[in-house]
Amino acid sequence: MTGVDALEAARAERWWHTRRRIGSIERAAAFIDDVGFALLFPKSGLAVPSLWDAVSDRTTASLPREWGPDIERVWGWKDELPDRGLAWYGHMLFGRPSFLSKEMLGLLYPRDGKPGDFRDAGLSPDAGRIAEVLLSSGPTASATLRLAVGLDGKAGGNRFSKAIVELGRRLVVTHAGTEEMDAGWPSAVFDLTARAFRIGRRPAGASTRAAERYLRTVLRAKPGELARAFGWPAASARDELDSLVRAGSAVRSSSSYLHADARGLY
């Protein structure tokens, strides 16, 4: 088995591809706790776990044409997991729809954990207005939120989506269930992360611990991949990986870093 094949096999085992497929929200939560972070659906070129790949052996290419039990479960869990406090969900990992375990959320959350702390996050005007509405109104359905901040219509919808990605990337908001609407699909409900989850003081060495957790899950990574995953400066990502090497938690292999558990792959 070549090094690349060995890495793919090790990742398949680490990301639950070789286990019984996930069929309950409790196992979905256990999966996220185990890997620490996961995309909702896989994305070509991003070597990280996804909940979909642990639930189904179907490729995402068929999803626009087919709506079956697996997609119904996964689509519902993205709102129910954070609503039940089992995992954070939003546009964080690579700026894409993704989950964080509560442990990982505590390591990555960059502020003091109070609902109004987003005022120190340097948000854009649209994102800031959304956060202020959530602060004053509590958990709010997407459709209601768009109207409240004046971002209805097609152009407003594009701006709203961009702001939601920004708010997720900075861990300001999370999903908090759904609300039935008069017509169409239920509307996703948003809430401030610091209100939806109990976030204590960020522990010492949190960034290094987050980098170790990332590498332990993906097994092999370059600094740029870690930086893009968490929205860190590239230099900071490299520094954290180098600190893992000094601590014996990782080894350097050319331009990549391998977790200590993965040394036998290369």
Image: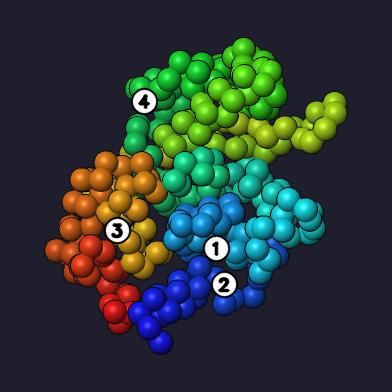
Q: Specify the farthest residue to the right.
A: 183
Q: CA distance from mark 4 to mark 3?
A: 27 Å
The quarter of the picture where the C terminus appears is bottom left
Sequence-wise first label, 1 or 3:
1
**Marking on residue 222:** 3
The vertical placement of 75 against 13, above or below, is above
Q: Position of residue 157 (x, y in %)?
A: 63, 23
1 or 3: mark nearer the eye: 3
- For disc 4, the neighbor class at 10 Å (few under 14, some 14 to 19, many from 20) is some
Q: Which mark is first along the chain, 2 or 1?
A: 2
The residue drawn where x is 37% and y is 58% is 214
Name the kind of residue labelled 3 in the image: Lys
The residue beneath circle 2 is: 17
Q: Quadrant of residue 149?
A: top right
Q: Secondary structure at mark 4?
A: loop
Residue 178 location, x and y as percent?
A: 71, 36
Q: In the picture, residue 186 is in which quadrant?
A: top right
Residue in view at x 39 percent, y 48 percent: 229
